[in-house]
Image: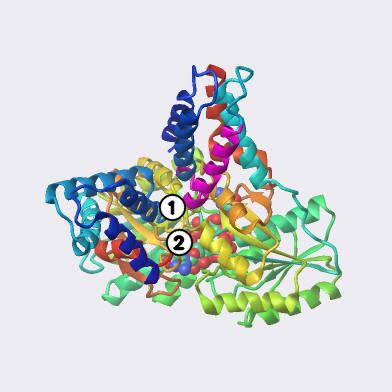
Amino acid sequence: MFDSLSERLEGAFKTLKGESKLTELNIAQSVKEIRRALVAADVNYKIAKEFTDTVKDKALGQENVLNAVKPGQLMVKIVNDELVDLMGGTVTDIDIKGKPAVILIAGLQGSGKTTFSGKLAYHLKGNRRKSPLLVACDVYRPAAINQLSVIGEQINVPVYKEMDNQNPVEIALKGIAHAQAHGHDVVIVDTAGRLSIDEKMMEEISNVKEAIQPNETLFVVDAMTGQDAVNTAKSFNDRINYDGVVLTKLDGDTRGGAALSIKYTVGKPIKFVSMGEKMETLDVFHPDRMASRILGMGDIISFVEKA
Amino acid sequence: EKTKSNLFGKITKAVAGKSTVDDEVLDELESILISSDVGLDTTVKIIDRIEQRVRRDKYVTTKELNELLRDEIVQLLAEHNTVDLEDYTLPSAAKPCIILVVGVNGVGKTTTIGKLAHQYKSQGKKVVLGAGDTFRAAAVDQLKIWSERVGCDFYSKGMQADPAAVAFETVQYAIQHNCDVAIIDTAGRLHTKINLMNELSKIRRSVSKSLDGAPHEVLLVLDATTGQNAFEQAKHFTDATDVSALALTKLDGTAKGGVAIGISDQFKVPIKYIGVGEGITQLQIFNKRAFVESLFEGEL
Ligand SMILES: Nc1nc2c(ncn2[C@@H]2O[C@H](COP(=O)(O)OP(=O)(O)OP(=O)(O)O)[C@@H](O)[C@H]2O)c(=O)[nH]1
Ligand SMILES: Nc1nc2c(ncn2[C@@H]2O[C@H](COP(=O)(O)OP(=O)(O)OP(=O)(O)O)[C@@H](O)[C@H]2O)c(=O)[nH]1
Ligand SMILES: [Mg+2]
Ligand SMILES: [Mg+2]
């Protein structure tokens, strides 16, 4: 995919090379290629279209900018700025005020919730001098509670669990009470993976949310997600109105177009990115880096240099 | 259902009675396929085939078009090895038959192993599961619980053990205990991590050393929600382990898993199983036609 993506972009801007200004024709050609590149990066195809329409309008508005900048460079700048703009906005910190502050973690199966719960606890403990408690509310997946316990041991954060309780609402509430009694100032509630169309499970997570009134609800999503990212992000948001998004598995080579699709669709900030299986591989979200990644900025820059 | 008929309505209106496919139709088709993660290259390939067909058959009616679309995609899958299985036959007549399961993190490897073991066990076969994920927290426990659910044998050397050694010994266990099949779990790993991919090649070699001709199947598990990155996954796992079959999981969700069409095509690996839930019986044998039907169902 990498080669063809860079080729596409190169092709797109090649059409602008040697031309002294942006014209309706060369804009149209390059916009089409940019759209294809975005789709290849897993940006939702409808969003890619809307996005490139905006880019096109902006580019057309600059038709009269003469030789000052090369048209290729100008186009790159328009696309990149627009993308950063879309994904940026004001990046809000997570809310960890409260005694204790409660953070609810939700998402599809296998997206990285349990791992992220551990990473967040580790981050809050190490960098924010908090005393977190992890609460194990996944009562379904085989060994889910064990998994969280092992992670808790690794990072030296206690885990509240009830091996025989099948009711996540109860476990969450008792976990919070436990935190209060034991002086923990942040509670991180790990939940089972669920599909957005699984009515019973979606009802469960909204009940948990209703009961514990979290300061922060985070939606965890795999950065490799394709076109479905939009559906899932929207359905979860409709049900639990989450406060932020966590993108996981960004340590691979996925372009991560899902990030753009989600931001565009639900407008919620991406608060963290998870980049590995180890506990320290958590980072805050950088819109500019994400934009470069989706576009394959390395390619663009080298192209502009050649131009 | 509603969306489906609307879409087909649109496509059909644009194409019916014509001997060429116009841009409007192609755009519609493109959007259906792209939104199922089929990807640009495969989509173009499919569209080319439709165009050729329409040109050849000259006049396409409303009814014919629906069939034609499906046929062409089914055909594409068929050309490249994806033969629907009749039942859960073992991939080889060898005894024991060794299956190695690989894939990136969280796709559903361990769950698929549990479900597959259940199928073999239901046929009266003697099954052992090898706990080759010695890395991820509680991975061994998770597989052990699955072996208990299935009621089959389980071989582990605990967490942190060398996965190649676990693989080797699982095969030995299967030989000594007269098992029909051994299924070996591995830790999830991103295909970009060279060390981990080398480790996987080593696991494979270790299985071969333990038993000539093994592994008889290397099953790459892909998550249906994954987009175009699945191509990279297939490429690197194939390079490292000679993948021989695909399993596509989480098809019970809203994702269509269309990327598997292109992968099967490009790597000439059959899609064998699909996962449709977290339960022990929620594994199905891949059916080309049903899969293609599902691409055109539901919301876009
Ligand atoms: N490479 C990589 N692997 C990750 C990352 N985050 C999680 N994982 C791995 O992804 C797999 C799934 O992670 P989990 O934390 O178990 O996911 P989950 O969402 O809790 O899964 P369920 O509880 O089954 O829904 C595990 O193998 C993790 O080690 C990441 O940022 N990078
Ligand atoms: N809805 C649904 N969930 C599934 C399916 N297959 C697996 N899962 C769930 O996906 C999550 C991850 O499954 P695992 O089997 O642990 O995945 P894995 O590939 O072994 O994960 P790692 O070993 O951490 O890399 C679990 O919550 C499973 O229950 C499926 O077909 N449908
Ligand atoms: Mg979990
Ligand atoms: Mg596993």
* Residue bearing mark 1: B103
In the depicted view, which residue is nearer to us: A266 or B276?
A266
> According to the image, label 2 marks what residue?
B108
Q: In this view, does A157 lie above or below A54?
A: below
Task: In this rendered view, identify the residue nearer to me: A57 or B127.
Answer: A57
Classify B230 as above or below B137.
above
Left or right, B105 with respect to A266, comes to left
Q: Which residue is drawn at 40% across and 43% down?
A: B201
Residue A39 colored in magenta in the image = no
In magenta, the rendered stretch is: A40-61
Q: Where is residue A21 in the image (x, y as percent from the top left)?
A: 55, 22
- Say what secondary structure mark 1 lies in: loop
Magenta region includes residue A43? yes
Quadrant of the rendered image containing residue A218 = bottom right
Magenta segment's dominant SS is helix
The local secondary structure at tag 2 comes to: loop
Residue A210: numbered disc: none
Instruction: Give the residue displayed 23% in from the left and 51% down from the top.
Output: B76
**Chain for disc number 2:** B
Specify whether disc 2 shares its chain with disc 1: yes
Q: Residue at x 34, y 65 (%)?
A: B294
What is the distance, in whole Å, between disc 2 and disc 1 at their CAs?
A: 8 Å
What is the x, y in percent for residue A168?
65, 78
Residue type, numbered disc 1: Gly
Task: Residue B170: give x, y in percent of width and height.
Answer: 38, 59
Given contact means CB atoms under 8 Å apart, are the residues at marks 2 and 1 in contact? yes
